[in-house]
Amino acid sequence: MWHTKLGERADEGRAERIILKKRRKQDPAAKGLGAVAICRPGSRANDDRANLRSKPAQASHRGQSYDVALLDLSSNGIMIAAEIPAEHGDNLSLVIEDSLPMTTCVRWVRDGKLGLEFSAGTEIVAEPEKRSLLLDTVCPHKKDQSGPPFPAMSRTVAGPQLVWVAKLLCEGRKATARLRTISESGTILSLSEPLGLTEGAKITIQLATIGSPTGKAGWCAGQEVYVRFNKDFDVTALRDEPCAEISAADATASGSFHGHEVQDDMDHLHIAAVRIGQWQKISDHDHRSVSLDELHEMLAATTRPAAAEV
């Protein structure tokens, strides 16, 4: 992988120290990176995911469009009901109302229902030249390599699976947000915790270095929200924003999304490297599994790590 060229003298322990410091704040007795459990939400029966079921949605599969019914949603994926001739491993593009397309992978099919898993990386919906500009700047050493780990991601940044995070602010409430899909007109976010957002709520998306675009909430469900920007957003500006590369374990979608109709929200990612000015490899240990909050803290660090030139 390209990030192995960073050099053995790169500060690979810096990210781990940030994680440990945060977890010790939660539990002073914590002695290891796995000593503090990550909280997971429990039953979703009473949250606002039910509101999503009334939303119109369409899925595209091999050039054909299908109306679908939305049944359940988590930060891993979504369950739909539809008559789609799809099989395990196929890719579907899903659009809820008039929001952005989300590329998903079919993980199970049963009795007219399909379990779709979201891509772990941030999906860029933009003209090819803008996506290329972003990729060539963020990962210049990868531009000649084809084929992302997650298959057929036509609208993602090709090559490594990259993820950007931010803070979502709304009426005194805030949460860390993963940019799931972003375009010049809006973004779909996956939050670290439910905020009880409602359609029309005024939202600020606080990025680390390139400003804070504002907008209004479109559809909201659990920890997922679609935000329509008040002004067009230049997606190429993300080249100046810290980001992370997701390891192959997450990029190929793994975990607990096989054959289960009810999914638990997963608020952590397996990170292979972080880009804060320059790329820094994360050592190959279990502690590279970080929550969204921990990843945001790593990327928002003001002191950039020393790293060898790629």
Image: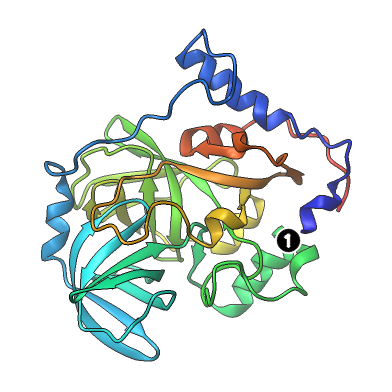
Name the residue nearer the viewer: 216 or 98. Answer: 98
Q: Residue furthest top?
A: 29
Examine the rendered structure and indicate whether residue 99 appears above or below residue 242: below
Which quarter of the rendered picture does the N terminus lie within? bottom right
Helix, strand or loop at label 1? It is loop
- Looking at the image, residue 142 sits to the left or right of residue 192; the answer is right
Residue at 28 percent of width and 36 percent of height: 41
Residue for badge 1: 139
Q: Please tell me which residue is depicted at 19% across the width and 76% down the height of the picture.
A: 112
Q: Is residue 125 left or right of residue 70?
A: right
List x then y, in percent, for residue 74. 30, 52
From the top left corner, tell me how far across and down residue 241 is, in percent. Answer: 62, 48
In this rendered view, identify the residue nearer to me: 238 or 120: 120
Height in image: 112 above or below 303?
Answer: below
x, y (%) of residue 292? 47, 39
Q: Is residue 300 visible?
A: no
Vertical arrangement, residue 82 with respect to residue 295, above or below: below
Q: Name the spot of residue 231 as percent of width and height, x first.
A: 40, 60
Position of 210 compared to 72: left or right?
Answer: right
- Identify the image quadrant of residue 46: top left
Residue furthest out toward the bottom: 63
* Residue found 84% across the figure and 47% down from its top: 6
Crowd class of label 1 (few under 14; some 14 to 19; many from 20; radius 10 Å): many
What colour scheme has been applied to the protein in the rendered image?
Answer: rainbow
The image quadrant that residue 107 belongs to is bottom left
